[in-house]
Amino acid sequence: MAFPGQPNIKLVNTAEYRESYANSVQVRVNVWDFFLVFGTLQQPTESEVEVRNFQGIYLSPQQAKALMSILQQNVSQYEKTFGDIKLDPHMAVPGGVN
């Protein structure tokens, strides 16, 4: 059901559109925006971890908050369907997201 005054939204992928897998996300924040850096984390040896960053995305504070909300809704629904998502306590970085 469409709400009065709401435009129809058409999603179009540009020629530059790509999909990738990331198991590492770094978040950098300043007064104007949030910067999310996506990468893949690999551990070639027991004492070495390598993160290969491949994409950085800038978000306005408003878009970052909207992303946080939609991710929370989707993670909650995922956990209701499939069970709790466990995080590896060794990978947690204070103040960071891995």
Image (cartoon, rainbow, N blue to C red):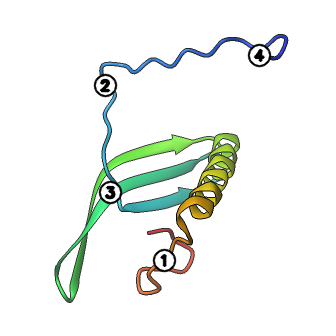
Task: For the residues labelled 4 and 3, say whether their Cβ atoms are less than 8 Å apart.
Answer: no
Residue 16's label in the rendered image is 2
Between 6 and 52, the one nearer to me in the picture: 6
The residue identified by callout 1 is: 87
Q: Kindly identify the amino acid type of the residue bearing the numbered disc 2.
A: Glu
Establish if 24 lies above or below 70: below
Distance between mark 1 and mark 2 Cα atoms: 33 Å
Label 2 and label 3: CA atoms lie apart by 18 Å
Q: CA distance from mark 3 to mark 1?
A: 18 Å
Q: Determine contact: label 1, label 2, CB under 8 Å.
A: no
In terms of secondary structure, where does tag 2 sit? loop
Contact, mark 4 vs mark 2 (Cβ under 8 Å): no
Q: What is the secondary structure assignment of the residue under circle 4?
A: loop
- Residue 98 at x, y = what percent? 44, 69
Mark 3: which amino acid? Gly
Circle nearer the N terminus (4, 2): 4
Q: Nearer the viewer, mark 4 or mark 3?
A: 4
